[in-house]
Image: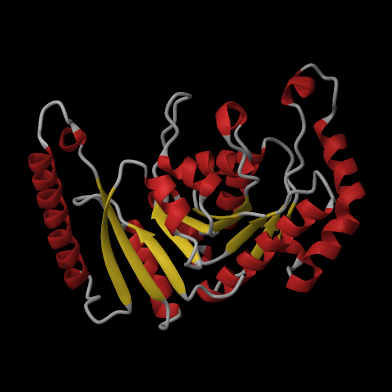
């Protein structure tokens, strides 16, 4: 992954903390030539009610709502001291933000958004939709800042690459290399150290029934995959002390590694599973998002 030269920033609603914009400004400082595309989304169900308002009334409502948001956006740029920054601003009328990003986000290097954690089976949050369909690497920021231990603040520029060793086929190897490459790039941008974590997953149900020994499972998994892992990470010069092999559920173990190291960013690959199966089963990226006390960068195959 190259340093991002163009970033699509999805802004939060007015009066919300603009974590995505703050992170975009941070990246702009590290790479001054980066261009920002700031997009604010608006939509009001009432303005779409054809049985209540005629076409002229609906257009007038939409125009006024968009005008007010554009004024807010200009004020935001001024207040953030970005008036002379290389950026464009845009207000988009749509209810389906994920679809808009999927259709219009292909011409940037990175999509940046603040994170919102809430999900029920019947409602998939925007963050999850973007993780499955965003055409570019997706950086979700700002949801956990207050939870990081103060004594680990010195390591908050560190980056953790999550490696999936469940399969050594070409597709998984390619995704693992993309994760490592992106993590290395962001560690360099942030001035931090690069870690990697390869979680050894096992059935806790079988462990509770004493049908498997977690320590034995971990030992055997490390022995069988250590040569492959070492070859995978060799080009990235990751010190042995920064290679983590915890055993358990992937979301729990990555979160535990984040807390142990104090790292501020986790990079994970997403298989982009879709449909009802995605909602019921999820994937590793979504499980990590649920629990990670760090920002999350999602890359796709």
Considering every residue shown, the one lying at the far front of the view is 55
Find residue 158 and report its image quarter: bottom right
In the rendering, at what x and y percent does residue 96 appear? 36, 42
**Image position of 286 with respect to 261: above or below:** above
In the rendering, at what x and y percent does residue 220 appear? 90, 41
Closest to the observer, 178 or 26: 178
In the rendering, at what x and y percent does residue 87 appear? 31, 74
Closest to the observer, 58 or 241: 58
Question: For the C terminus, which image quadrant?
Answer: bottom right
Q: In this view of the protein, can residue 141 be seen by the observer?
A: no
Side (left or right) of 171 relative to 261 = right
Closest to the observer, 213 or 181: 181
Q: How many marks?
A: 0
Coloring applied to the structure = secondary structure
> What residue sits 42% from the left and 46% below the top?
98
> What residue sits 45% from the left and 33% below the top?
124
Side (left or right) of 170 relative to 8 = right
**Image position of 219 with respect to 37: above or below:** above
Question: For the N terminus, which image quadrant?
Answer: bottom right
> What residue sits 39% from the left and 71% below the top?
26
Find residue 284 and report its image quarter: top right
> What residue sits 55% from the left and 44% below the top?
132
In the rendering, at what x and y percent does residue 125 appear? 42, 37
Side (left or right) of 160 relative to 56 = right
Side (left or right) of 90 relative to 242 = left
Q: In this view of the protein, can residue 51 be seen by the observer?
A: yes
């Amino acid at each position: 992954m190259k340093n991002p030269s163009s970033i699509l920033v999805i802004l939060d609603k007015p009066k919300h903390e603009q974590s995505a914009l703050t992170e975009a400004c941070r990246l702009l400082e590290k790479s001054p030539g980066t261009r920002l595309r700031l997009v604010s989304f608006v939509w009001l169900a009432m303005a779409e009610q054809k049985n209540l308002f005629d076409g002229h009334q609906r257009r007038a409502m939409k125009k006024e709502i968009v005008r007010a948001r554009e004024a807010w956006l200009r004020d935001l740029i001024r207040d953030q001291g970005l008036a002379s920054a290389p950026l464009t601003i845009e207000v988009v009328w749509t209810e389906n933000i994920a679809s808009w990003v999927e259709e219009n986000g292909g011409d940037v290097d990175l999509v940046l958004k603040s994170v919102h954690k809430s999900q029920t089976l019947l409602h998939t949050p925007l963050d999850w939709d973007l993780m499955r369909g965003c055409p570019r690497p997706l950086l979700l920021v700002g949801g956990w800042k207050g939870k990081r231990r103060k004594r680990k603040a010195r390591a908050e520029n560190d980056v953790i690459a999550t490696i999936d060793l469940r399969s050594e086929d070409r597709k998984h190897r390619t995704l693992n290399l993309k994760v490592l490459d992106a993590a290395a790039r962001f560690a360099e941008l942030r001035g931090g150290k690069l870690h990697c974590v390869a979680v050894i997953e096992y059935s806790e149900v079988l462990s509770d029934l004493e049908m498997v020994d977690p320590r034995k499972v971990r030992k055997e998994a490390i022995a069988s995959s250590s040569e492959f892992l070492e070859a995978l990470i060799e080009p990235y010069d990751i010190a042995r002390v920064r290679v983590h092999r915890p055993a358990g559920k992937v979301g729990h173990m990555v979160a535990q590694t984040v807390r142990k190291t104090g790292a501020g960013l986790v990079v994970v690959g997403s298989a982009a599973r879709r449909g009802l199966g995605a909602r019921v089963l999820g994937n590793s990226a979504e499980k990590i998002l649920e629990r990670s006390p760090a920002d999350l960068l999602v890359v796709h195959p």
